[in-house]
Image (tube, rainbow, N blue to C red):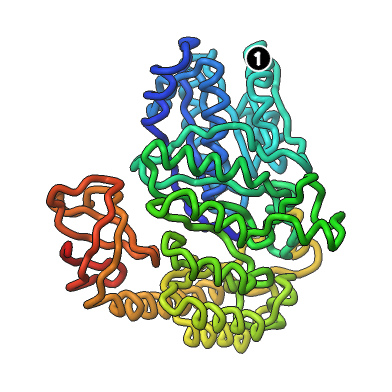
Amino acid sequence: MENKIIDESKQGEALEIKSSETLPSNGKKLFLESYGCQMNFADSEIVASILIDKGYTTTTDYKEADLIFVNTCAIRENAESRVRQRLYDYKKVKRKNKDVLIGVLGCMAERLKHQFLEQEKLVDMVVGPDAYRDLPNLIAVAEDGQQAINVILSKEETYADISPVRLDHNGVSAFVSIMRGCDNMCSFCVVPFTRGRERSREPETIVRECREAFDKGYREVTLLGQNVNSYLWSGGGLKKENLTDEQRAISTTFAQLLEMVALINPDLRVRYSTSHPKDMGDDVLYTMAKYDNICKCIHLPVQSGNSDVLEKMNRGYTREWYLDRIAAIRRILPDASISTDIITGFCGETEAQHQDTLSLMEEVKYEFAYMFSYSERPKTLAERKYEDDVPSEIKSRRLTEIVDLQRKHSEIRTKEGLGKVFRVLVENVSKKSIEMMSGRNSQNTIVVFPKGNLKKGDYVNVLVTSCTSGTLIGECV
């Protein structure tokens, strides 16, 4: 999976306002917790919308909930361990109140359904990422004391007609899903098995959702997909592999979608995640250069700096191809920041191949990176075909070297902002001082500055006067 991976939970107070003000309540409370990537958080907003329409209000305290859902991530073993521990916490609530229902949503659903339902008896419902419309029926089944399960993957479902309930805390930035699933079949990745085949969402529904977010006060949208660069919508909704050359010529590409969203309003900033190097074309880069409100920030996962490892990973590009895409970004968008994902210790990785990753990092000098040791995932090609033969202590040592080098590069890139003026979107009060505000510039770097009369959602020009290793500090000008 290419989206940024984060092991954290998030609940949204805004849900309680919407559900209590605009829809009749059924008297029951929903607690919804998400783990993993940005796509999971966007899915949680779909789930919240569906259940609020059925009369649920929300709570940020699971101990008072009637319905507890955990939206899960299957990308790394650590995420699965955290989810299982949380389910044991929730089971304690059920012991006190047998009417409480507990469900698992998302990527862990299909693989661990029998363990959760039958062996460990941790949950009442297991719901896959394409079955959220069926939630009211599944809840009714569980209320009757039966196990409720739907993990069927769809080739069409995009939830395009459902307006998400925003779960974010700041009310400034919104996630908008533009596609679902993935066709890439990277050998290490479980996403094609947990989220199904790739399908793009109708562009008009995406633009409408972004416009609605702007009208509600949001000033930034992030367009989400496992591989946004391969987004393609034909008027007839045909699959990409079935399109003729003539149909492709009149289809909406990702570059065209970016432009459509950017044209909503100059004050609506547009980000996207994530790009696949094999599909990163110059058309997207030129569109980004054309519009100031498309953020100059590109997440381009490399995974490894060695072409033989990349081939074994089934990434579809070589080291040389990747560096060519980096050169194109530097040429067309000289002020853009570039971040990446790196996996160390993949099956059979030699010390020389590890050194190739370090040398590529030295050449690119990323602003930021998500860095992991390889973790074998069930059903993947790597599990079936390769041996996970790099010892854990070597993985750990190599990961430390990668992290240390990235820390050095991040500090170099941050210091390049000294003396420059950036347009910053105000997002929150600074965590360290109530007299300061924080936000991000177009390059996705955190900027801290005096509060003054500023409020969330404002734009401000900030002259950077100092910095830490990863944060710019300045004054409003």
The picture places residue 182, in percent across and down from the top left corner, at 71, 55
**Which residue is labeled 1 in the image?**
140
Residue 372 in view: no
Q: Residue at x 55, y 71 (%)?
A: 285
Residue sitting nearer the eye, 232 or 250: 250
Residue 20 quadrant:
top left
Residue 247 quadrant:
bottom right
Q: Is residue 72 above or below residue 388?
A: above
Indicate the quadrant containing the N terminus: top left, top right, bottom left or bottom right. bottom right
Question: Taking 226 as reference, is 259 left or right?
Answer: left
The picture places residue 11, in percent across and down from the top left corner, at 42, 35
Mark 1 crowd level (few <14, some 14–19, many ≥20, 10 Å Cα): few
Q: Is residue 135 above or below residue 415?
A: above
The picture places residue 245, in percent across and down from the top left corner, at 84, 63
Indicate the quadrant containing the C terminus: top left, top right, bottom left or bottom right. bottom left
Q: Residue at x 28, y 66 (%)?
A: 471
The picture places residue 469, in percent across and down from the top left corner, at 29, 72
Q: Callout 1: helix, strand or loop?
A: helix
Question: Taking 116 as reference, is 365 left or right?
Answer: left
Amino acid type, mark 1: Ala
